[in-house]
Amino acid sequence: MSADKVGAGDTATTQPPMSKERKQQARRRVLRTLLLTGGVLGAAISGYLPLAYAQKQRLRPPGALDEKDFLSSCIKCGQCVQVCPVDAIKLADLVDGFGVGTPFIDARAQACDFSCDAVQCILACPTGSLTYKKPEFLPVRPGAKLAGKPILLAKENDPEPTLNLAERIGVARLTRPESCLAIQGKGFKGQARGPEFKGELRYMKVDRWKPIKVAEHPYDVALCDLCVQACPIKGAISIETVFAPDGSQRKSPVVHEACVGCGVCEMICPTAPASIEIIPGEGWRA
Amino acid sequence: MNEILRRRFVDQILVMLGREAKKPAALTPRAQQAHELKRMTLKADLQATKAHMRAHQAETHTWRNRRWVTLILANLLFVVSFAFDIQILEGALTASRFIGFHLIDLNSALQVMLAHKHIIVNLVIGTATIFVFWLLFGGRSFCSWVCPYHLLAEWAESLHLWLVKKKLVTDQPIDRRLRTVFWLVFALLALLTGYTVFEAISPTGIVSRAMIYGPGLALLWVLALLVFEVFFVRRAWCRYACPIGLTYGVVGIFSPLRVKYTLAGCFHEGDCRKVCLVPHVLDTVIKGRAVDTEVPIGPDCTRCGLCVDTCPTGSLKFEVKGLSKLM
């Protein structure tokens, strides 16, 4: 207390000396302030670190910037979710580890089949995370650039048959050739993904404007070519005769440069797990 | 605006940034006179008038009810626009479109601009629209009239106050400068990491998205905040942490819509400070502190109107600056 009294006359310390109780209160307040600081920053960092060290990339909606730029520009409003006619776009949750509230596509559950005709999600995006035209200063991943504007089969006879997409969001790969029905020379009969599957697809022969459930559209083919039938992009995939290492001939789905990475082939593939999958963010390699 | 009010105007900005409200250095002569007259009033007379006022005071929740209805309707409009595909207000609170017009939350926009370092036209349009809107309607009015977390926190607060009354918990205040620090830290994090770090923990965004797109585990963080507020620190997030509040507070500095304090009829009982989310803006109601006979409340005020409802003498009222001159 005596030390306080010495300072009492100074102009700098015009306030009365603090009582012991007040001092203790102040100290506790500092501790609580630190506690809240730690809590909030801890939560923020735990939201960020999984992203910084993410191993697996997620399939983002069409027109998405490269992952890092996408994460920096996405404002997490979900307007892309709202315009999608087939509800392909979902928002990531806390445990997903790729950005709370950012949109992604789980192609196996519901792929983007461009039922909207004009890539509506890009049109809806307010920040340019999804964009028709990437700003010049942003780099283009090797193999991401499409050779030409993709032609949407559904619009093939329209005056403007193309989709306004400059880059692919991924590439389809036959990741499990051993289970592919075409390679085994097998056909397919029935609902592609079983009666319970909720995914939708636009079938031009059924309705040009309204996607229907895949379960409502059973197939019957002598040699399975569901991925080729369902693919919405012209010239992106076809069944070709290929030679196995032992020299024997067989049929196989072959992905071409036109593939935009929409994931319809992955969704429709009747094998479990899917024989053909989208590799998100992957570029085209001839 | 006279020199003394101008000094208070600047002072209130510093108070918003976290400085403690202090006794003013100088008062206008008419304010001094008013304070003097109050001191001269006979104690017995004053007591009698107070008792009379109290006896006739009706408990009103006019502004609170208006505010709750507005807040719920605004958020409901988001929900039904998507759920029933009526497309009036599409998106979430972070960014949306009102019948096609872009609206973008100022803090989210700031985070994206800092992280991405590239600003497209739609982002500018949406941000400018919202900036002008809240400039007109009081900056932090966003907090109490729109933010869904504010409403949850308000309910948690009444639970907290009930527990305080039962002497089961006490309010443990925190240093208010923390919010300014958080604002800077999150701005810096966005700039350096290139990721909108704050958006991942923003309860406003999380609650808004949960209502529109369905609940997720991110709500656990919101729940943790609410529990903290109920048992430890009254309104911790809104008072001491939320950078969104500070962003809108800055917009509110120049807003004409505000609460105005009139010195003459005030009994200095402090009911208003007890219900206030940001009692430091109401320091002017403390006996002897009003620098003028009429004092506008500072920018950290959320214009929630609880003080207006509570004041038994009508000394706190909403005003639109300059409107009285026009009309």
Image (spheres, coloured by chain):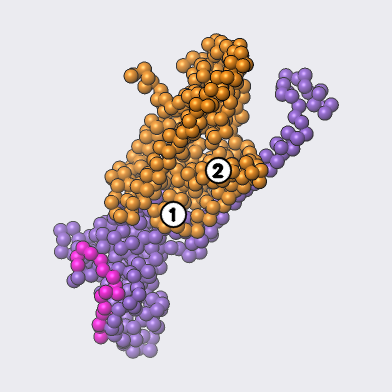
Q: Examine the rendered structure and indicate whether residue A7 appears above or below residue B206.
A: above
Residue A143, label in figure: none
Amino acid under disc 2: Glu
Q: Which residue is mark 2?
A: B157
Disc 1 on helix, strand or loop? Answer: helix
Q: Nearer the viewer, residue B183 or B68?
A: B68
The color chain A is rendered in: purple
Q: Position of residue B228 (x, y in %)?
A: 60, 48
Query: Contact (CB < 8 A) between labels 2 and 1?
Result: no
Front residue of B292 and A65: B292
- Say which residue label 1 marks: B210
Q: Is residue B243 above or below residue B25?
A: below
Report the chain holding disc 1: B
- Looking at the colours in the rendered structure, which chain would you say is drawn in orange? B
| Among numbered discs 2 and 1, the one appearing first in the sequence | 2
Please state if B49 lies on the left or on the right of A238 as rendered.
right
A208 above or below A130? below
Expressed as whole percent of the image width and height from the top left, the position of residue B319 reads: 42, 25
Using a 10 Å C-alpha cutoff, classify the residue at mark 2 as few (fewer than 14 neighbours), some (14 to 19) or many (20 or more): many
Q: Does A208 appear in magenta?
A: yes
Quick one: quadrant of the C terminus of chain A?
Answer: bottom left
User: Toward which corner of the image does residue A225 lie, by quadrant?
Assistant: bottom left
Q: Nearer the viewer, residue B100 or B169?
A: B169
Q: Is residue A89 magenta?
A: no
Work out whether residue A275 can be spotted. Answer: yes
**How far apart are the two marked residues, 2 and 1, measured between alpha carbons?**
22 Å
Start-end of magenta stretch: A207-225
> Looking at the image, which residue is at 46% across and 16% down?
B1
Quadrant of the rendering where the N terminus of chain A is positioned:
top right
Residue A216: x percent and y percent? 27, 74
Q: Residue at x 59, y 13 (%)?
A: B41
Q: Is residue A149 visible?
A: no
